Image (cartoon, rainbow, N blue to C red):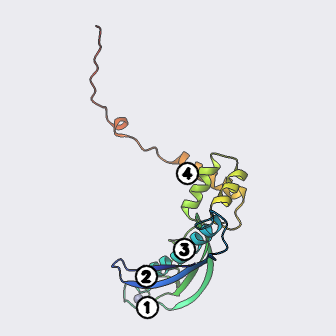
């Protein structure tokens, strides 16, 4: 048996714009362990990582494409350079292309170059991965948290227990300094009736 997993990206209208083959699985019919059906855990992790990789690339391309035109004169900015960048996600490490464009000749940009992802991808990891690290890091020892992450999810690269500790402390600091969300009963006095049953 052979199974091909293909991703289809469209514009939300159902018309397929781009198809990407992410994985091809093969199972010999006459050579299977009794009861051993379905994708293996390792195949599942690889599949998630492959889907994440293609998804991120497509998402970034669609984010950058409409921003390449100058908002003032509409001219397309020229490519200056690009480099491959790593992004650690909860579903594994992925790679993306960070472009730098020459500023528009009309002067609207106010700088020499424009980096479209500068304010979009500001960290080397996604917030979800940092949250997962903090969630586990607050519950079990950091080394154990790392072992659980490695066991269940695709690898996010060179992270170790120190990374998990740093993310746990960072999230904890953010929570400590965040303004508490006040419920309505803490900001205005509730109307309540009190009855005493003396019977
Ligand atoms: Zn312009």
Mark closest to the chain's N terminus, 3 or 2: 3
Dot label at residue 76: 1
Q: Does the residue tagged 2 have its C-beta within 8 Å of any atom of ligand 1?
A: no
CA gap between label 2 and label 1 equals 9 Å
CA gap between label 4 and label 1 equals 40 Å
Relative to residue 131, is residue 96 depicted above or below? below
Dot label at residue 174: 4
Relative to residue 153, is residue 81 depicted above or below? below
Mark closest to the chain's N terminus, 2 or 1: 2
Mark closest to the chain's N terminus, 4 or 1: 1
Which corner quadrant of the image does residue 28 belong to?
Answer: bottom right
Q: In the depicted view, which residue is nearer to us: 99 or 27?
A: 27
Q: Residue at x 63, y 45 (%)?
A: 139
Mark 2: secondary structure: helix
- The residue where tag 2 is placed is 67
x and y percentages locating residue 2 in the rendered image: 57, 79
CA gap between label 3 and label 1 equals 30 Å
Mark 1: secondary structure: loop
CA gap between label 3 and label 2 equals 25 Å
CA gap between label 2 and label 4 equals 32 Å
x and y percentages locating residue 133 in the rendered image: 62, 55
Q: Residue at x 40, y 41 (%)?
A: 182
Label 2–label 4 contact, CB within 8 A: no
x and y percentages locating residue 106 in the rendered image: 42, 90
Q: In the depicted view, which residue is nearer to us: 59 or 27?
A: 27
Mark closest to the chain's N terminus, 3 or 1: 3
- The residue where tag 3 is placed is 51
């Amino acid at each position: 048996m052979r199974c091909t997993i293909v991703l289809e990206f469209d514009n939300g209208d159902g018309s397929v714009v781009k198809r990407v083959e992410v994985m091809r699985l093969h199972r010999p019919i006459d050579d299977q362990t009794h009861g051993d059906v379905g994708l293996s855990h390792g195949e599942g992790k690889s599949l998630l990582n492959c889907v994440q990789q293609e998804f991120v690339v497509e998402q970034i391309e669609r984010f950058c494409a409409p921003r390449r035109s100058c908002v003032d004169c509409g001219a397309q900015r020229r490519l200056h350079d690009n480099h491959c960048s790593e992004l650690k996600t909860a579903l594994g490490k992925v790679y993306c292309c960070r472009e730098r464009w020459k500023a528009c000749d009309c002067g609207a940009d106010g700088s020499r170059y424009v980096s479209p992802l500068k304010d979009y991808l500001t960290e080397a990891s996604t917030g979800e991965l940092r949250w997962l690290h903090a969630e586990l890091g607050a519950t079990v020892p950091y080394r154990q948290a790392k072992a659980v992450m490695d066991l269940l999810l695709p690898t996010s690269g060179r992270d170790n227990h120190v990374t998990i500790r740093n993310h746990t402390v960072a999230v904890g600091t953010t929570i400590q300094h965040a303004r508490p969300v006040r419920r309505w009963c803490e900001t205005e006095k509730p109307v309540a009736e009190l009855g005493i049953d003396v019977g």
